[in-house]
Image (spheres, rainbow, N blue to C red):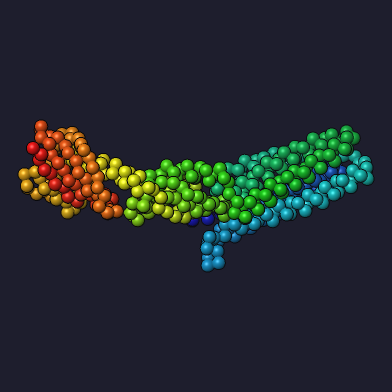
Amino acid sequence: MNNSRYQDLKLAERGALLSIWAYVILSIIKLTVANMTHSESLRADGFNNITDILGNVAVLIGLKIARRPADDDHTYGHWKVESVASLVTSFIMFVVGFFVLKDTVTAIISNTQTSVDFMGSFVGIGSAIVMFAIYLYNRNLATRSKSSGLMSAAKDNLSDAVSSIATSIAIFAASFNLTFIDRLMAIVITIFIFKTAYDIFAESVFSLSDGFDEEKIDIYTKEISEIPKVSAVKFIRGRTYGSNIFLDVVVEMSPDLSVFESHAATEDIEETLKEKYDVFDIDVHVEPAILADEERDASIALVILGLEEQVLNNRNSSLLAETFTEIRADGSVIDKAQKGLEQHEHLAIADYKPDRISKKTIVLTYHYFEHDQTFAVTSIWRRRTQWYCEARQLTQKS
């Protein structure tokens, strides 16, 4: 899985590079045309694209560093660098947004009247088409590569497409001497910059401070609770490293389970969460479930009852220990192989009574009826990796 994730990040770099080149070309065109047509909104949109260049460069650097394998100083890997890069991007966007807003407000206060050429609106329309196409490409690539950084960049591509359409409308209106609309749209675009910067900032800080979605915790808890042998989910802690989810899970299981069975259950938990929810790493800790003695004994007795019924009707010879012996009612002794050759009709257990000798040994006594005769059975069960029948003795009752 680790190698696959590293390849995913390398794949995501394509989208970041494509966005960088697109923003470089578009920002040059927009700022050049903005100076020629005197459009404040197109100028603001051009500066917005400059912030996008810086943001995508930060994302690209983050993706490259995040692909570095774990080392002695970074035992969890370098995944969090992707979140750090996003945080740096948000700071850059805040600063650029502030200067764009400052220039726009200054122009409004000075009430400078300039003629705006509507030809600049075509730049905005062309930019919107280009950015929407890049959005579709990056969205699909982010889904394939499972890159949260590239998905954020894709959403920014979409907001840029919308901003460019708004810019075209503003320029067209300003060309008819409605200059205030052009400047109003410049403020709106600046707000878009601040909004995107805040969203990236909040998401990055949430990830870097080990914040985690509570809804996902509830989903994981429900899924783990349905896995056999898990008595309860005590708690789950989650954190993200880039787009990778790391979980610490503490579950309760019956104290009667062997180490082998408990370990098998933890592997079921890990496999389920990785396959269904793409969790990158899971650390499962098992604690003994606290049960009343009566409740635990009753639970085990029901399990042994079902197993003994299978042995009685010779339906599952794997429940017999390799050293199994049975003393028949006539005094003869048979072993596991001979027991497997027997055939019985549907025999029913009556007067069932379990007696727990030790933590791993239970003695059963009961009666069953066959061919108008009653037989008393004493059966010894012992737990190893699972419950096995060690010995049985049959006595015919008069």
* Residue 280 in sight in this render: no
> Between residues 191 and 57, which one lies in front from this camera angle?
191
Residue extending farthest top: 372
Whether residue 151 sits left or right of residue 128 in the image: it is left
Whether residue 263 sits left or right of residue 220 in the image: it is left
Place of residue 365 in the rendered image (x, y in percent of width and height, measured from the top left): 19, 44
Identify which residue is drawn at 18% across, 33% down: 346
Residue 161 lies in quadrant? top right
Place of residue 128 in the rendered image (x, y in percent of width and height, measured from the top left): 71, 39
Whether residue 348 sits left or right of residue 9 in the image: it is left
Identify which residue is drawn at 9% across, 49% down: 333
Identify which residue is drawn at 58% across, 43% down: 140
Number of labels in the image equals 0
> Between residues 242 and 55, which one lies in front from this camera angle?
242
Identify which residue is drawn at 47% across, 49% down: 234
* Residue 197 in sight in this render: yes
Place of residue 208 in the rendered image (x, y in percent of width and height, measured from the top left): 62, 55
Place of residue 188 in the rendered image (x, y in percent of width and height, measured from the top left): 79, 41
